Amino acid sequence: MPITERQPRVTIKDVALAAGVHFTTVSLALRHHPSIPASTRERIETEAKRIGYAPNPVFAALTHFRVHGRVRATPPRVAYIINHPLEKYQHEQSFWAGAKEQAEMLGYDLELISVSQGHHDSKSLARYLRAQNITGIIIGAFEPGLAELKLDWRDYAIVKIDSLHMEPQTTSVSNDQRQDVRMAFREMRARGYRRIGLAVGRASEESIQFRYTAGYLIERSSIPLEDHVPELHFPHQAPWGKVSELIGNWIRKHKIEAVLCNWSSLGQLLTDAGLRVPKDVACACLCLTGESNGLAGIRPNLHMVGVKAVSLLTSQLKQDSRGVAAFASNTYVRSRWQDGPSAPQKIFATVS
Amino acid sequence: MKRLPTSGLKRYPTMSDVAIAVGVHPTTVSLALRSHPSIPLVTRTRILNAVREIGYIRDPLLDAFNFHRCSKHTSKQSPSIAFIADANSAPFFDGAAYHPLVYEGVRAVADPQHLSLEVFELGKNGLTPSRLNTILSSRGITGILLSTFTLATQDIELDWRNFSTVKIESHHLLPQIDVVSNDQCQAARLCMRKLREFGYRRIGLATALDDESRLQDNFGSGFLVEQADLPEAECVPPLLFKRAGVAEVAARLAEWVKENDVDVIMTNWNEFFREASWLTAEGIRFPTHPPLHIPRDVAFASLDAPADRPQVAGIVQNHRLVGMRAMEHLEVLVKTYQRGAPANPSGTYVPGFWRDGATVPKKTVRRARVQGASL
């Protein structure tokens, strides 16, 4: 329903009337209070949207002053910058959805900007951000090799999602690779696998500061020496056939019973190496994003990564800290284990 | 808006006063106070300095109006954040229940926002979790910062669903919730790289078993990942010892140094430097058999270099920043009603930095050899 100038402002009481609840319920629901069931909240949100409710900024400022002892400044707009179309990767969409949701929750206006599309080079981007009064930016996972970002970092509060390989070295958020690999290792041990190997690309390890290897080594140090297997790092730019051959030889040479790898095409990689999963070797993927395709492994919560990125950015904006911090923190979000046919319970009867 | 003549009467400074003092338009002052990007940093700094000098504050009339408005509400604002410390943690902090710098950081974020903070020490004066739960709920406290807890406490029986909570350091503590911590993994890695730069080749990590479980094996994993690229001859097995008295730990350490030909000890234990009778002019002397001199016999790098012992080289942890990050994190959770344990908790890690000190002299092996040759 369009609102003309003559109509009085839509308030939460109007929303309450439309949804058939008390207005305090509306207030709680719009702030995602846990006491309001999700179904009620969704109904209220739909009603609020339909009749065009928006929080009254004057009341919001006064209430904020009353509670916190100071008037809230205009919430700054923040930008979420990527260097490829959002549609390209499913995991990117999860980051973005989480970031968007949290920004709305905290009263920020989050704008998606893709620097690979159309007119945005770094210079025009800087002009645009300035014109739009945007001082906070999230650098969404940047794909290496595409458009790069060169801004005067001192002007912005910045949080990066992944992208540890690129400048600026600032506050970042990602899934917790070190704990992920530890979780996968323990799950495989619990299923009876003894010789567990880690196979990851050297390039991807460099971009995450060898966090998979760090987690793997600490787990390996807790098991008997005879079960130790050396980790495999694929060389840079190795083609598919080469990786498949390397992984096959490594598994055969070290009699590996279970492989942990961050490639989602792990199953195919092993098949191409002439190994049957799980008959010859079991495996778990360290980063399941889309369909699992029969793989067991680690399912990261990318939505939460996006949420945390916005939380960190708003804290920085509040403290008015801009530019590259001397001691930037890294935040890692824990993942979950997901069962799958590639990692069944080991059958001990076959061991003579 | 015209101002009344001010002769004799003390009036409040306004933005216009600031503007005149700095030589800019009042709207520039307004923008600068809101950190608008159109105002260059130098101008903003100048304006903020003038604001401080002149003593400009927001319109007191508006403040009074709000005071009036608030006074209609009978309830006084109660503390909104509880800082829960463990009375058993005293051995970690020289007798205090929590790290003073962490607490300082927490206050640095909470105070400017008028978030009131109250410290509760579990285990002190018979404060039990259930009693604390009652206190927190009756005071309407919804935000909790959990300070460092020893392994003796595995979980605290509070009704977590009612609270937004952030843990500081104690990864082991249940439920699994968001943690903010020093980056011990980075500390171990950076320390090791520095020691290699200084010429050390038999670098050993020694830490208490309970520290490692409390800190998610972070020292160990950093140490091992740095060792991964080293030749076998330069890899020392880490020493994980049981928490015990200083003399007992020192004896264990001395034995391990000898067995493994360690040239530098890397540890988060600073207790040795608190033993006054061990201190010598050059460093310290472990009263073991035979005695072990630091740094003469073996160098010593702390993974948590203490501020009051400048002779100790090592990694300085940013405890104050940990407190700040934890409070900022909690603020967002409270604001967005994220209560209870999340499905996917996060860990936020604050890096530390290297500090030189007498306990880690540069290795002069190479030069000594050259001198030997010239003799």
Image: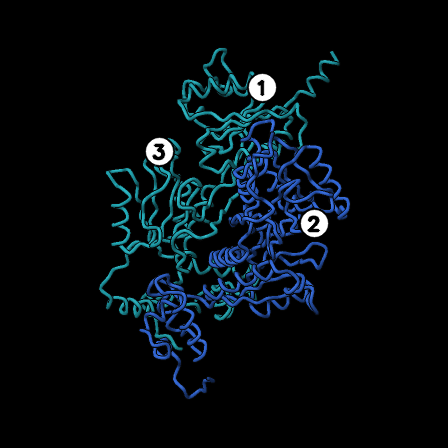
Chain colours: A blue, B cyan
Q: Is residue B57 left or right of residue A227?
A: left
Residue at (25, 50) in percent of width and height: B134
In the image, what residue type sits under mark 3?
Ala
At mark 2, the secondary structure is: helix
Note whether residue B212 is visible.
Answer: yes
Residue type at numbered disc 2: Gln
- Quick check: do tags 2 and 1 share a chain? no
Q: What percent of the width, then of the height, locates residue B222?
A: 57, 36
Task: Tell me: A8 left or right of A318.
Answer: left
- Position of B93 relative to B350 (above/below): above
Q: Residue furthest left?
A: B74
Residue B49 showing in the rendered view: no
Kindly identify which residue carries mark 3.
B90
Decide: few, some or many residues near mark 2? Use Cα within 10 Å; few <14, some 14-19, many ≥20: some
Looking at marks 3 and 1 on the same chain, the residue that comes earlier in the sequence is marked by 3
Chain containing the residue with disc 1: B
- Distance CA(mark 2)–CA(mark 1): 45 Å
Give the position of the N terminus of chain B as an image quadrant. bottom left
How packed mark 1 is, by other alpha carbons closer than 10 Å (few <14, some 14-19, many 20 or more), is some
Residue A248 against residue B136 in the figure, above or below? above
Q: Which residue is mark 2?
A: A268
Q: Which mark is residue B260?
A: 1
Q: Given this view, does label 2 or label 1 mark the residue nearer the observer?
A: 2
Label 3 lies in what chain? B
Q: Point out residue A252 in the picture as x, y percentages from the top left corner.
A: 71, 35
* Location of residue A236 (image quadrant): top right
Query: Which class describes the residues within 10 Å of circle 3: few (<14), some (14-19), or many (20+)?
Result: some
Select label 3 or label 2 by which is in front.
2
Report the residue at 30% width, 40% height from top.
B122
The answer for how far apart the CA atoms under marks 3 and 1 are is: 33 Å
Residues behind callouts 3 and 2 on a single chain = no
For the C terminus of chain B, the image quarter is top right
